[in-house]
Image (cartoon, helix red, strand yellow):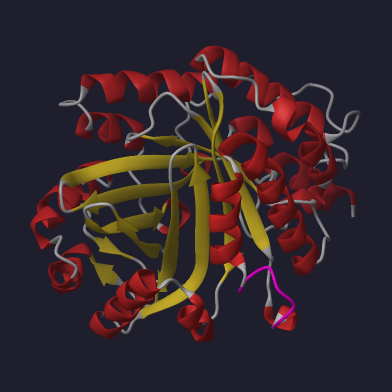
Amino acid sequence: MNQPPSNHGKQPMATHVKRSLATAARALGTRDPLPYLDSLIDRTFRLPDDDVSYARNALTPGAVPYEPSFSETEPDTLRFTIEPLGPGAAPVARRDEATREMRRLVQPVFGRDALRWFDSRSEEWRGFGGLSWMNYGAWFGSAFDEDGLYAAKIYYELLPTQIEALSPGLGLLTRQVMAEMPSLMPIFTSIGCKRDSGSQRVTFLHRGKLQVSALGPMMNRLGIGHQLPSLMRIVGVALGGRFDLPDGGVLVGVREAPNGAELKLEILLAAIPDLPARFLDLLKLGLAERPRQLAALSRWLEAFGMEEAREQGHFSVLSIRVNPSSPARISLYVRPIEFEMRDSIEEARLLQ
């Protein structure tokens, strides 16, 4: 199990992020991400490991902006997202940095066609327009398997006026979702490349409380209404029978999948007022019928030192995806214990 660093304040945070990734790569049997991302990690986490300014970020507020995630559909990969360039960077600088990293990695690993596809999909968001409205700029995600870089992804902030710049199919899907549920407001788009495919998703913030069953009419319109029971089962088991989600606690993503529309329900766990103390055990119970994925989740939690995590703040997001041919499948996003900034924040407060 990873142990919290004992020499806070004496090393750049990059040292700990690299150690976390190297440890996880060995445990999961993937390639080490550092040959691909070493310099980006250095630029992003160059400040000392006790610098409380790390906590001021849009990705994992209150913790270092480093968010590993487990995906049931990709159980043997090492996946993580960061907010590039560290505290105080301008949003446009983060956007440009994330874009450069995507382009730097995509062509040599995935090929020229993949780069052309990415450039065509990202043109609206990597241009010069509308810079003043950005909040954080962009996030950068990557995934690794035993062969090396498996996927790279960028998250761009999105304005409602930019929907017209989406591909025709995704634009239509986005407008259908907003027409069916006016409480959904688009907030970012993610563009990802893999070895043999690319995809783009639009993610919405749900304004107000949400009963999970209220997704039914929209899911019916998208041709995935028959998957609502499996989605509700995961929510009910993981949240201890809770189906009402609070204001500010729900994101909804949609993308075009090969067999139709895919919906991604993201529950922001910090917003749940009474997350069960046995959340992890309940989540594992929901995977009991899929032993391979259950074993992979346990192995992944151990790789990031999270197998004994019980505090609500250690878990960022529970994500549940469905499409026409696949019932609910989960992803879990975490805040590794050693990257929580609460102790450093409290020490800084006492010294004031």
Q: Is residue 111 magenta?
A: no
Relative to residue 275, is residue 106 drawn left or right?
A: right
Please identify the residue farthest to the front as the structure is shown: 112
Residue under the point 36% across and 38% down = 277
Relative to residue 295, is residue 61 drawn left or right?
A: right
Q: Position of residue 281 (x, y in %)?
A: 30, 29
**Total tally of numbered discs in the picture:** 0
Front position in the image: 127 or 31: 127
Would you place residue 349 above or below residue 181 in this image? above
Quadrant (top left/top right/bottom left/bottom right) for the C terminus: bottom right
Relative to residue 202, is residue 85 drawn left or right?
A: right
Residue under the point 75% across and 47% down = 346
Q: Position of residue 272 (x, y in %)?
A: 39, 56
Q: Position of residue 112 (x, y in %)?
A: 61, 46
Would you place residue 177 above or below residue 259 in this image? below
Question: Could you tell me if residue 307 is visible in this image?
Answer: no
Would you place residue 179 above or below residue 26 in this image? below
Dividing the picture into quadrants, the one containing residue 209 is bottom left
Q: Position of residue 323 (x, y in %)?
A: 22, 53
Front position in the image: 339 or 142: 142
Quadrant (top left/top right/bottom left/bottom right) for the N terminus: top right
Front position in the image: 51 or 127: 127
Q: What's the magenta region?
A: 124-129
Provide the major secondary structure of the magenta segment: loop
Question: Could you tell me if residue 216 is visible in this image?
Answer: yes
Q: Is residue 125 magenta?
A: yes
Dividing the picture into quadrants, the one containing residue 99 is bottom right
Would you place residue 209 above or below residue 314 in this image? below
Residue under the point 65% across and 51% down = 62
